[in-house]
Image (cartoon, coloured by chain):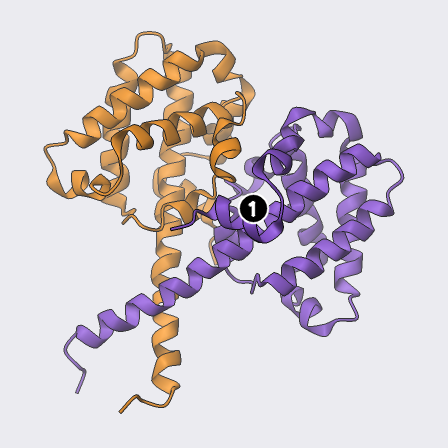
Chain colours: A purple, B orange
Amino acid sequence: MQSLQEKASQWSGVDPDDAFAIDGTNLFQKLGLPTFVNLSTNFYTRVYDDEEEWFRSIFANSKKEEAIQNQYEFFVQRMGGPPLYSQRKGHPALIARHRPFPVTRQAAERWLHHMQQALDSIPEIDDDSKTKMMNFFRHTAFFLVAGDELKNQNQRVPCKHSASKPAAA
Amino acid sequence: MQSLQEKASQWSGVDPDDAFAIDGTNLFQKLGLPTFVNLSTNFYTRVYDDEEEWFRSIFANSKKEEAIQNQYEFFVQRMGGPPLYSQRKGHPALIARHRPFPVTRQAAERWLHHMQQALDSIPEIDDDSKTKMMNFFRHTAFFLVAGDELKNQNQRVPCKHSASKPAAA
């Protein structure tokens, strides 16, 4: 059985070495907190204004300000800064926390489209950092698509179980 | 609805500030890689030899050497060292990766019992580090119990769905 990491690499086209090249530099020290806040604000402004209703609707039950904070706190923590996210919300538990959302391949691509545009809108982010971040994001997006499929796997099991229980009738 | 973090704190009795006090010191630099390898080896030797069959059986389909490596690589990464785990396996995705296992409160307590004994067996680990690590482990164990309950929530939904499909008969 393919691991989550193998699926993420195959589906994203990004090798783990490239995805985790973000660990070779301290991007938080290089870019600073305000840049991460700007990036997430720019990104979610695009998402919440998306002309594609199917994508926009994924976020309909989340508050924009909270989505922004969750995202930049996670990015800061993951890219060499203080563990802001875990101090406030605990382990990232990326797959589990994405359970409420349909993380399809199409949704991953749309997320990445907006993120590429957001990165391109922040002049403080140099090209090398941008490439490293996009590789990480692309690999992670498809890691979450792989995680989303676990959810579907699970859905098949319990029905067999309940079928083997004595019927209520 | 209580968040994962709130459940983890309430059930474990460990506040997030205490759980994530591991982030106030670099425990990897303080203790070094061999100490983490020794800790995980000692821990899993206890687990795989556990006299409690119900607990031992949770690990029956996992290779001991792999369990040891997964654990110390994650600890090293989480406690200030190089991201060994992510380079090899991707995001920790703690809850998703524990899906195959029944992470009950009883299992969490048994895991913590063995971990306390393992920590007490490694003289290189000073009392302050031990306290910080146990707070992190206790909070995390119950974070995973909270995550395990998501799995059960999910199990109720699909059977309704399949009930609404045309029956095969």
Confirm whether residue B13 shows in the render: no
| Residue lying at 42% horizontally and 30% vertically, measured from the top left | B136
A132 left or right of B156 in image: right
| Residue lying at 43% horizontally and 26% vertically, measured from the top left | B73
Q: Which residue is mark 1?
A: A9
* Image quarter in which the C terminus of chain B is found: bottom left
Report the label total: 1
Q: Disc 1 residue type?
A: Ser
Outermost residue toward the right in this view: A123
In the rendered view, tell whether residue A141 sits above or below residue B22. Answer: below
| Residue lying at 30% horizontally and 18% vertically, measured from the top left | B119
A125 left or right of B21 in image: right
Confirm whether residue A99 shows in the render: yes
In the rendered view, tell whether residue B148 sits above or below residue B59. Answer: below
Give residue B57's position: percent from left, percent from top.
Answer: 17, 42
The crowding category of the residue bearing disc 1, from other C-alpha atoms within 10 Å (few below 14, some 14 to 19, many at least 20), is many
Which residue is more in the foreground, A68 or A5?
A5
The answer to which quarter of the image holds residue B154 is bottom left
Which residue is more in the foreground, A155 or A4?
A4
For mark 1, give the secondary structure: helix
Chain letter of the residue beneath label 1 in the structure image:
A
Give residue B132's position: percent from left, percent from top.
Answer: 42, 22
Which residue is more in the foreground, B95 or A113?
A113
Give residue A35's position: percent from left, percent from top.
Answer: 81, 37
The answer to which quarter of the image holds residue A130 is top right
| Residue lying at 75% horizontally and 51% vertically, measured from the top left | A115
Give residue B97's position: percent from left, percent from top.
Answer: 40, 45
